[in-house]
């Protein structure tokens, strides 16, 4: 099963390079260069994991994270930045980010984090499926 991934970052060269590297490793990758475009893409696609840059013009990463979580609560968000502050990391975690990573990041380390996040998403989806089945069986009296 392929991880459905959205990369949201205003650095076009970085996004395209990362998307290519991850696509070669069987990730299903979509890209966006600003928060507004990411939200539009999310209207038509479901993602397991989202890589989100913290500092972007317009809608910054924290605001984008809030909006993403309103749209897709199950998606795990990895915040990525080259301009991190401890306070930004704390704000991101409070808003529901899964983890916080610093640029530059080694591809192997990023893939490990993506797979950790994906595993947790799949576990959550499985628990939801089981609860829905249990609820149906209970309502039918089985």
Image (cartoon, rainbow, N blue to C red):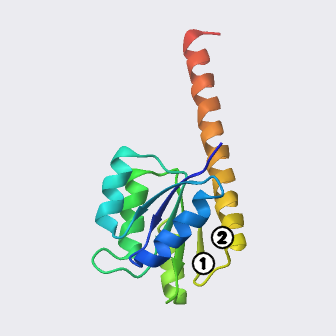
Percent across and percent down for residue 94 are 50, 71
Mark 1 lies on residue: 101
Question: Where does the image place residue 36, in percent across and percent down from the top left?
Answer: 29, 64
Q: Is residue 39 left or right of residue 137?
A: left
- As drawn, the label of residue 118 is none
Q: Secondary structure at mark 2?
A: helix
Q: Residue at x 58, y 75 (%)?
A: 100
Residue that sits furthest to the top in the current view: 141
Judge by depth and name the residue closer to the eye, 115 or 28. Answer: 28
What residue appears at the point 43 percent right and 57 percent down from the top-left corner? Answer: 69
When the figure is inspected, residue 56 is found, relative to residue 121, above or below; the finding is below
Query: Is residue 15 left or right of 111 when viewed as pictured?
Result: left
Q: Which residue is rendered at x = 33% and y = 67% of the image?
A: 35
Quarter occupied by residue 60 = bottom left
Q: CA distance from mark 2 to mark 1?
A: 8 Å
Dot 1: within a 10 Å radius of its alpha carbon, few (fewer than 14), some, or many (20 or more) residues? Answer: some
Snapshot quadrant of residue 142? top right
Q: Which mark is residue 110?
A: 2
**Can you say whether 73 is above or below 107 in the image?**
above
- Residue nearest the observer in this picture, 27 or 141: 27
Q: Is residue 142 above or below residue 12?
A: above
């Amino acid at each position: 099963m392929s991880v459905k991934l959205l990369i949201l970052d205003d650095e076009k060269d970085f996004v395209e390079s990362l998307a290519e590297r991850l696509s070669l490793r069987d990730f299903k990758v979509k890209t966006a260069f600003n928060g507004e475009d990411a939200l539009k893409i999310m209207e038509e696609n479901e993602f397991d994991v989202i890589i989100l840059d913290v500092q972007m013009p317009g809608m910054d990463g924290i605001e984008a994270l809030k909006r993403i979580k309103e749209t897709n609560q199950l998606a795990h968000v990895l915040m990525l930045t080259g301009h991190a502050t401890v306070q930004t990391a704390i704000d991101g975690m409070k808003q529901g980010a899964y983890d916080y990573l610093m640029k530059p990041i080694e591809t192997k380390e990023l893939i490990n984090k993506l797979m950790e996040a994906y595993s947790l998403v799949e576990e959550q989806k499985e628990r939801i499926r089981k609860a829905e089945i249990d609820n149906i069986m209970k309502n039918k009296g089985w």
